[in-house]
Amino acid sequence: MEKGTLLDTFKRNQNHSLKTLFGIYKGHYPELFLSVVFFVIKHSPVWVLPIVTSNIINIVTNPGADAGRRIIINVIIMVVIIAQNVLTNYFHTLFYARAIRNVEQDLRSALVRKLQQLSITYHKEMQSGRLQSKIMRDVEQIETLSSQIFITVLSIILNVAVALAVVVTKSLTVFAFFIGTIPVAVLIMVTFKGKIKRYNKEFRKDMEETSVHVMEMIDMIPVTRAHALEQQETDKMDYQLRHVAKSGLRLDIVQSYFSSISWVAFQIFQVLCLGFTGYLASKGKISVGEVVMYQTYFGTIVAQVSGIITLLPTIAKGLESVDSIADVLLSHDVEDNYNKKKLPFVHGEITFQDTGFRYLDGDQPVFEHLNLKIEAGQTIAFVGESGAGKTTILNMVIGFLHATAGKVLIDGYDIEEIDLHSYRSHIAVVPQTPILFSGTIRENITYGKEDISEERLQEVVEAANLTEVIAQLPDGLDTMVMEHGSNLSGGQRQRISIARAFIRDPKILILDEATSALDSISEEKIRVATDNLVQNRTTLIVAHRLATIKNADYIAVVGRGGLKEFGSYEELMEKKGEFYQLRQLQM
């Protein structure tokens, strides 16, 4: 199914989980139909065996001259019907499994695609552990439910339908008895459905919360170990795990009651059926063989109804997962670039025009009435106390955050009216904490620019001050980067980040406290690399170490509410204002 069609299915069937479940298989209906056809054929021995058994019992109880021949014919028919199961079961599994696996892939692909479209604000508010749980666990639950529908539920429906069809052709009296069990099944399901759904929802949310805590715990292990807080962290996780265990236990108990009550009810009905058909046989209204046949079919119906009741928790869990995935796919917090102006080229002029910004849950604006024009090719350093809005300004230039007042202009175009995807192809960001993925150093540097020549790559490595580092590694540029770059130093990781920015040849460069966590030697190497990088580019720098921004064209001092000072390093030092005071504190 096309990603757009899949999303349309979720939109069209909002608040109807079951409709959504069947809707996501649109495009796979022919495969599912063939699967059903082969299922009916392969499952036929279950329905034919009671009839053959009844025939043989009747032959034995009333043998004729050709009794042996009739028994052999019945046995041969049964053996042939059983043997065909091998081939038909293969085709049944092939068709339904192919459809389910394709939908499973489509769902995960749609989620990944949507996550790439959702705003940075959404990702900051939604923990990554929850998103991981939706992509992996919830999709798996839907796959499990789909498998149950195309195996267990299909089997139940067909077994009950065939059993009732045979019985109604044989005896309306016995059929009426069979039908009498349906209200009991419905009553049991209605009684427990609400509780099972509610407990399933609570358990899913608790599992998502636990996934968040586990990821945070793993990330915190170096800090935890360094401060001898292992026991405290273990106790905190134990508390969360106990909470999940209690939530799971509540779900298990209600499912257990549900299962046991339904089992007892239908076992009693089965005993009553045996007594009822035995009474009819004693009166000569049915044969002895038919007693066995009816008992077998009723046993089949009891087993199938019990099966659907037992399956109800799995159905509830799967439908809850459908709703969970819908939470992401139907989120409207997306970056909309539709029909907006594409920028094939960026000069790098940035203008803040009476700009203000306030977070949705903020009591006060981060800043307001910010007026600043940055010419193409200039390097501007933003300094100020933590929380003053420096990083917020950078995020507005990237387009991660949007002005709540005034405008941000890129080359004279309002950033709200341009295609941010086309614009961002001309910018590069070096964050405070370098982000590397598991792969080679070469892949990390050329990320998104895989067609770079070897000569250009070597130029970038040299400009990023990485030549010596690469020479010392066992496999050079093809050395594998471990998770989070743990086999590299902070300075090495940051220089790889700078090389990644270099390779993009951006017109606008953003450096967000790129040296704040480094030692003096690493900082100097980074400074050399960044000096190479900023040439002929509009560069915005956030730095806490004021000595690193002497070469900036201008320095913007950001304080609570907006821009406090603006000028060159020398001008601001001579002015002896806020920048001067900040500089004195670091000397």
Image: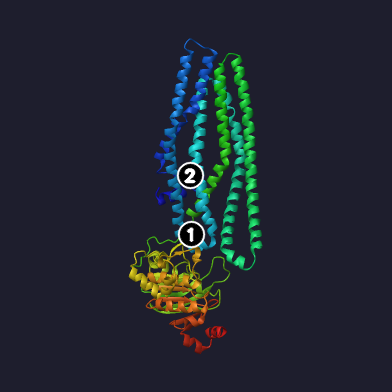
Q: Regarding mark 2 in the picture, which secondary structure is present there?
A: helix
Residue farthest bottom in this picture: 574
Question: Which numbered dot is residue 244?
Answer: none
Rendering coords of residue 339 (x, y %): 37, 61
Residue farthest top in this picture: 65
Question: Which residue position holds label 2?
Answer: 21
- The image quadrant of residue 301 is top right
For residue 126, above or below residue 405? above
Front residue (pair 357, 129): 129
Rendering coords of residue 267 (x, y %): 62, 29
For residue 538, above or below residue 362? below
- The image quadrant of residue 476 is bottom left
Rendering coords of residue 466 (x, y %): 42, 73
Question: Which residue position holds label 1?
Answer: 333
Amino acid at the residue labelled 1: Asp
Amino acid at the residue labelled 2: Leu
Judged left or right of residue 482, residue 250 is: right
Q: Residue at 64%, 42% (x, y): give it.
A: 254
Front residue (pair 200, 221): 221
Q: Regarding mark 1 in the picture, which secondary structure is present there?
A: loop
Q: Residue at 59%, 31% (x, y): give it.
A: 183
